[in-house]
Amino acid sequence: MLYVYDLQAGRNLFINAQTERFLGKSARELFGAGPDDHCTLLHPDDHLLLQEFRAQWNTASADQVFHKEYRLRHASGEYRWITSFETVLARDAQGRPSHILGTAVDIHAHKLAEANHQRIHPRAWPWPSTTAQLGLWTLELATQRLGWNAQMFSIYGLDPATFGDDLATWRSAVLPEDLATARAALQTALQSGQVFDVQFRARRPNGQVRWINASAATVRDATHQVTHLIGVNQDITEAKRAEAELHTNRALLEGILRATPAFIYVHDLPTNRNVFANAGLTTLLGYTPQHLQAMGPQVIPTLLHPENAEALQGTLRSVLAGQDDDTTYAATYRLRHQDGTWRWVQDQGTVFMRGEDGQTQQILGTVIDITERKAAEDALRASEARYRSLFDGATNPIVMYDAEARFLMLNAAARGHLPPEAWLGQPLGDFFPEKQEETLARLAHVFKTGETFYVEDWLDLPQGRTLFWSVFQPVRNAQGVVEAVQVISHDITAQHKQDAVESEREKLSLLLNQERDLSKLRSRLLDTIAHEFRTPLTIIATSSAILATHSDRLSPEKAALRLRNIAQQVERLEEMLDEISTLSRARQGLLTFIPSLTDIPSFCQNLLDEATGLSNRPHRLHLELALEQTIAVLDPNLLHHALMNLLSNAIKYSPEGGDISLTVRQQSGHLLFTVRDQGIGIPRQEHKRLFEPFYRASNVGTIRGTGLGLALVREAVELHEGTVHLESQLGQGSAFTLRLPLRT
């Protein structure tokens, strides 16, 4: 049986259910039992013993354990023997013991057996024993003969038939580590004649170790010489176990009370006092348990926030009204810290003790600090309020969906775009069935990937067909898991209409520009034909007329010269027509790209040899190669046409002669073909337009040309998926670089 006794109030604060087995009374019946109740329960012969025992508590040390035996009246009316072990559980502000923790063991059966057992050892014990369960012994000093009663043999587990009736038998049973103490006590008794009382351990033949409490006194003869020692042995093993259990329970309880960060208290309702508080109080509020006890009945008015007083009193009234021992309560309120600040706490408790009338006398509670949690909750509520304000106040529709496209949240703007019956928990498909499947797919993508994406979508709303630009955003929980999708939409119908108008305007503008370009192109073409075709045609006409009218007067050599002139001009006209035809096919996408493996050094050398035949001035043409790979996939016809155009231009626009180079090098996965001359150069402001069809630089003077060559160069390069780059300075020459992807 385990119990807690309040010394100052003189009543039980706690008693466990073992009372039913001990005394035939429930724990509830013994809650709050006071001095009058104890007098009723205690055997009349044990009243004085218990009073003396209680007086010892005034000087009890911290770890001291008190042991006593007494009789208590069972519910049946019978008195039963009890042995108990008690220690200090708590002290008051002055350091005096205020609460006792005790454990009790029923020894009634042992006492009855002791009273009924009469047999003693015939040789050594001349009088009958009336104390069964107590081992009685005698030692004759002259003969050193040892006599035991039957209980001694039972205590030590020895067989009387093999008993050696001397001290050696006893010494062999005592544990070596306890023997010196026992022998010293025996020797002291012999020398001083005083009663000795000692505890030691003995090992039975079966190996079992028992705790023994031994007491002895001397017997003297007429001459006052000590002739005998008579003593009592009692097996106190169970008592020792109970004492150890008491220490363990106390250590466990103290450990729990120390280790828990919570403030644990026992509050007496009739006196409005705290009768127990653990060290968690100091952590929570800065006060010591002694401070709390010193506040007395002012503890609640002193510590409780006035705004929480009414609610807490209501909670306590409900506890007082409860008749169930399992009645619990929970309350949240503020307590004043020693530094003057207020701390929010959560209090959970239960009925600890009831009076004889069944009313709650004391409550046991556990208080934890929730100040930070309350601050976080307040911040969360404020954040949610701000979010709700922003959410509902947003002018754009905002809808939050679950994975099944059900509405979780709708702001006012969204509700304005939806039918009146649309509300939370309903799927989008109920109102826009044609959008259900598409929306589910979009939501599934966000739930799976956590990605944000944007869409444009038409919706048929009551107010008309509307185009929305919407962003689908994941909404994550504290663990980072997507638990919803928020869709923010913007009505772009008006903007779309404006964009459509702008698009049509841009298309018309583009068509007009194209028409202007075509008009300019036609004009340039006609100018080119009129200018470039006139000279060959004039030469052809003149030569033909001379041959027709003066053939009889022309020598064969002069007639042949006229025919060669006609053939050369016809060839020139064919070249110009070919260029115009090639450009026309390129503009229509009819110019085909036919790649093949090309030997670059051989290709370039043949090209340079061909270009050399075009020059009738002192030009120096040379080739430079810097290649890691000499074979590449190119369209040799297109590349030939482009490079020959550049080389012929270099010759044509270098009237004074000079160096002309074709350089081929490899760089970052590309082939770079550069044609460089020392000719007249090109004005910088005209670089951008130079590749337009029929465009010629303003400084070409009388040098003939159609303005188609560079346009065809660009077409050939773009079919290779390359680029062309120009560097030029007036009077110093030009460099054209074709940058083509290297394919092998």
Image: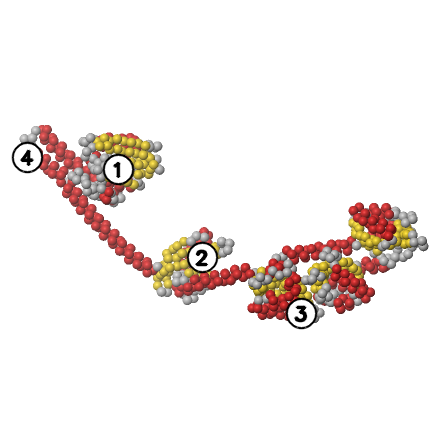
Q: Are marks 2 and 3 in contact (CB under 8 Å)?
A: no
Q: Nearer the viewer, mark 4 or mark 2?
A: 2
Q: Residues within 10 Å of mark 1 (few under 14, many from 20)?
A: many
- Which one is in front, 434 or 652? 652
Q: Residue furthest right?
A: 222
Task: Tell me which numbered mark, 4 or 1, is placed earlier along the sequence.
Answer: 4
Q: Which mark, residue 549?
A: 4
Label 1 to label 3: alpha-carbon separation: 110 Å
The residue labelled by disc 2 is 485
Asked whether the viewer can see residue 412, the reply is yes
The residue that appears at 59% across and 68% down in the rendered structure is 312
- Left of 103 or right of it: where is 666? left
Numbered tag placed on residue 347 in the rendering: none
Distance, label 2 to label 3, CA atoms, is 58 Å
Quadrant for residue 317, please give it. bottom right
Q: Is residue 680 above or below residue 201?
A: above
**Residue 456 to residue 165: above or below:** below
Q: Earlier in the sequence, mark 1 or mark 3?
A: 3
Q: Is residue 404 visible?
A: no
Q: Which mark is residue 735?
A: 1
Marks 4, 3: nearer the viewer: 3
The mark lying in front, picked from 2 and 1, is 1
What residue did someone put label 3 on? Answer: 270
Can you tell which of label 4 and label 1 is closer to the viewer? Answer: 1
What residue do we see at 17% from left, 36% from top? 571
Q: Earlier in the sequence, mark 2 or mark 3?
A: 3
* Residue at image location 77% in from the left, 62% down from the top: 55
Of the residues shown, which amino acid type is indicated by label 3? Pro
N-term mark: 2 or 1: 2
